Amino acid sequence: MDPAETLRQALRKQQHTRREYQEAKNREQPPDESPEQWSRHVQDLREAAEVAEAEMEQLRPVQPKADRSPDEEYQPPMGPDLSN
């Protein structure tokens, strides 16, 4: 599998697990589950979402950090008098 497809797959997993966790967190406890069971279920979903996010962070390409401050103005490699 190529790196782009691996990244897409990890992103889908991250989005799916995060959505499941958010939905479970906002839903009321089902009547057929005890508070402990429901709490454990939500906790498991949260942990799965965190694992998926960690995997995504590991796969995400590293962004180069800017060495200059955002206030610095761009300096072309050669002066305007030397360019065409």
Image (cartoon, rainbow, N blue to C red):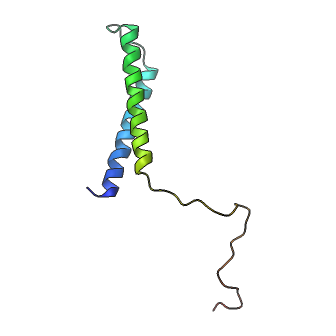
Q: Position of residue 15 (x, y in %)?
A: 40, 39
Which residue is drawn at the image coordinates 40% and 9% (left, top)? 35
Q: Residue at x 34, y 56 (%)?
A: 4
- Of residues 64 and 20, which is closer to you in this image? 64
Q: Vertical placement of 26 versus 5: above or below?
A: above
Q: Quadrant of the C terminus?
A: bottom right
**Residue 12: x, y in percent?**
35, 43
Quadrant of the rendered image containing residue 29: top left
Which residue: 72% across, 69% down?
A: 73
Residue drawn at (40%, 50%) of the image? 59
Q: Quadrant of the N terminus?
A: bottom left
In this image, 17 relative to 70: left or right? left
Figure label count? 0
Q: Position of residue 17 (x, y in %)?
A: 37, 33
Where on the picture, by quarter, is residue 43? top left
Above or below residue 17? Residue 27 is above
Tell me where residue 21 appears, x and y as whole percent.
Answer: 41, 28
In this view, 84 is above or below 51: below
